[in-house]
Image (cartoon, grey):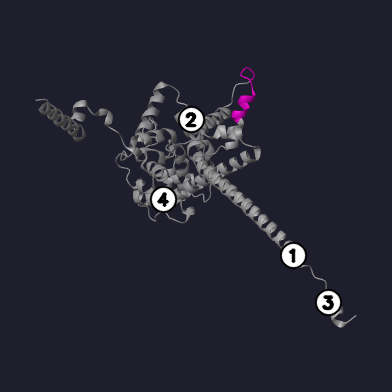
Amino acid sequence: MSQAEGDSQPSAAPSERSVSESVPTSTVRRKIAALEEKLQELEAGRMVKQRESNYFMSQGRAIRRMVSLFDSIEDLISENDRRYDVADDEDPEETIDQARLQMGYVILSNVLPWFHPKASDMEYEDYAQMLKKLRQGADSARGDDTSKLKSLVPDWVNREFKPNPPVDYEDKYSRGFVNDACGKLLCPTELDWNNPIVRAGIRDRADGYIVTEMSWPTFLYEKYTADQDKLEEGLFKSAILIQAFKSIFTSPSSAKDIDGEGDGANIIENNRRAKREFSGRKVKTHLRFALSAVTSWRSVDGDFDYVQFWRIIIDFFEKAPGRLAQRKVERLLAWWTRKVFGTSRRAELTDAAKSSMSVNALARQRAQEDDALKQRCAK
């Protein structure tokens, strides 16, 4: 055998090589196209999930503001489910906590009307993920609100009381009862902060000077003064409370003007919002935190329980002892609506006043001109 013959290697015919190469190439292309299509589907699904998650988080922000400041959404749902599972004749007398949780669920259903039907149709994993995102949104809103008030309150207090030294914008430890201006606002109405013995007693937490949620703080009252014989007069009408509400529910810039009534913009919708949100209920709790020396959100500050304080405020509005007390609550809410959103006086317009307005006057003039033209043409 020759050298050339020994070195030669067998090779496929041209026709066989072209067939063997074309088959894998087309297969690979089909696989790539299928993978790209699947990737697009996964990407589209991921984007849908992301949009849905963002939606749940944004909707959850309403929970701490309009439903419940402290109760978890899981507790609200559990109480509603418990009532469905127990027959009416088997259900023992409900506790105060159960009644509060059920009321919270009713409000949740009104604030998020899509929640109940959507939750009923979801798989458990999707349902759990939805609750997680709602909870994240709720807690995020509460954190944002407390942070906002924490930075705004020093400016309001310094302008109103001009303390020396002024309330520090950064140092939360300089607030609370160690600061004369903040201490005056946090002081129970039954005590006189101007009395040095009272100030020392509160700061030392001495007997007779323990500050708990069972005392109305001075910052809740109009002109920061309460009549011990008429404790309802001026309650929930303080300037700093209006500023806090406006900064959260309208805008921080609107909190600068609180002397008059609101500007009346979109008054009909705003009145609906006011009825849903009055919520000064939760603002009062946040404001108390902003005035205190506590640096991070917590439910108890020394002897003061924020959860019980919030519940006391809720009961004031929702558990009026009689018709007279209920009418006073309704007048107070109407006062807040006017103060924050303004007053619509459209209903006070007479027919004569409406007819003289330029829109109606122009309509009459056009009709008169048209009538005159018809008469000329008929002649």
Look at the image and say whether residue 87 sits in the magenta stretch. yes
Of pointers 2 and 1, the one earlier in the residue sequence: 1
The residue tagged 1 is: 15
Tell me the residue at 41%/36% (across/down). 273
Circle 3 residue: 8
Rendered location of residue 363, percent (x, y): 19, 32
Q: Total of numbered circles in the picture?
A: 4
The numbered disc on residue 152 is 4
- The answer to whether residue 29 is magenta is no
Residue 378 as seen in the image, left or right of residue 144 = left
Disc number lying in front (3 or 1): 1
Q: Are marks 3 and 1 in contact (CB under 8 Å)?
A: no
Name the kind of residue labelled 4 in the image: Leu
The magenta stretch spans which residues?
79-90
- Dot 3, how many residues are within 10 Å of its Cα: few (below 14), some (14-19), or many (20+)? few
Mark 4 packing: few (<14 Cα in 10 Å), some, or many (20+)?
some
